[in-house]
Image (spheres, rainbow, N blue to C red):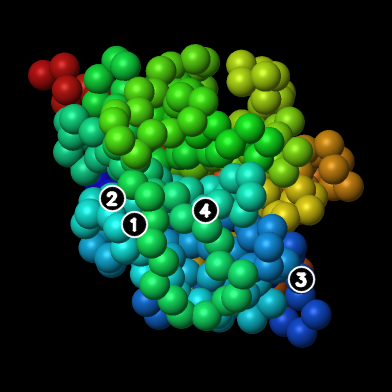
Amino acid sequence: MRRPFALIAATLLVGALALPAASASDGNDGNDGFTIEDARITESSGLAASRLHPGVYWTHNDSDDGPYLYAVDSATGETVARLTLTGIGTPRDVEAISIGPGNKIFVGDIGDNLGGTWPYVWIYELPEPKELEDATVRATQYVVKYSDGPRDAESMIVHPKTGRVYIIDKKEDGGHLYEGPAELSASGDNMFRPVAPIDLWATDAALSPDGRQLAVRGYFGGIHYSWNGGEPKREGRLSVPLQGQGESVTYSADGSRLMYGSEGTESPVEARDVPGGDGGGGGEGTRADDGKSTAADGEGGTVEVGALVAAGAFVALLFGLRRLRRRR
């Protein structure tokens, strides 16, 4: 994926502040977070909780890896299956993964390293295997176009009840939710049309298992919406963990937690309570009465809110400098 100027610089600062994920341990059901241990997974850009295999999360690399999907056991962080997709072309920029009705896996090859110039992108569909083992699986490839022209995107969701596919484009000033046809066709173009604004520079999104809530994340924050029949209504901010390069989000299979992933070797997947859940809507990492983050590190420490504010100010400064350069 194309790394924007501000993100590259800000990542250096954020990396110094980032908290370690909860490590996989005996008895961990994955809802408390884990670390992806597979050395082959260096650019985890999408995340989806399996409903067929409890505690398993599907992920994939960003690009330059091949047509592979990885099933990671959250109890250990180890890969328990790698799928090789056939029946498709060469993947270009795989950015998202989601599971729809009937345990169908949808893979979004929807990124655009040329900044939104490819005339079409692809979605792949395949059945989730009943047995977790390395296997070759034939997938169906769908051609995707946008009604208002090419664009970059990293977020794709599949409604768990209807199976309809949606994409959110990636724009600094906020993008749009694009709705696909009621059923995707393998024999022609599938036109996606904008149906609602999304107030975030989105790197991934997820629908709750009951299809009623939409979570959208960016590099440094997130927003939750009520699905509202496909016309999302903004409800509030998400408690997104501070990560070096936050790329993915999914609901846990039981819908109680939001799981946030990041790129990098041995990348962390961190858990937060869903808004309105047992954690009071904010989950770990919400603001405490003493003005500190309650997201504890491995030794029970906290991160000062002032440091996070400084990071935000630094990023804002870099964005401002880049905008000034554009005007010259």
* Sequence order check, earlier mark of 1 and 3: 3
* Sequence order check, earlier mark of 2 and 4: 2
* Sequence order check, earlier mark of 1 and 2: 1
Between the residue at mark 1 and the residue at mark 2, the CA separation in whole angstroms equals 6 Å
Residue 202 in the image: above or below residue 45: above
Quick one: 56 or 37, which is closer to the camera? 56
Drawn side of residue 171 relative to residue 161, left or right: left
Tell me the quadrant of the picture where the C terminus can be found: top left
Q: Residue furthest front?
A: 187
Report the amino acid beneath label 1: Asp
Taking the spot 47% from the left edge, 55% from the top edge, the residue there is 126
Residue 47 in sight: no
Q: Residue furthest left?
A: 328
Between the residue at mark 2 and the residue at mark 3, the CA separation in whole angstroms equals 31 Å
The picture places residue 11, in percent across and down from the top left corner, at 39, 53
* Contact? badges 1 and 2 (CB < 8 Å): yes
Which of discs 4 and 3 lies nearer the camera? The answer is: 4
Disc 4 crowd, CA 10 A, few/some/many (<14, 14-19, 20+)? many
Name the disc covering residue 62, or none. Answer: 1
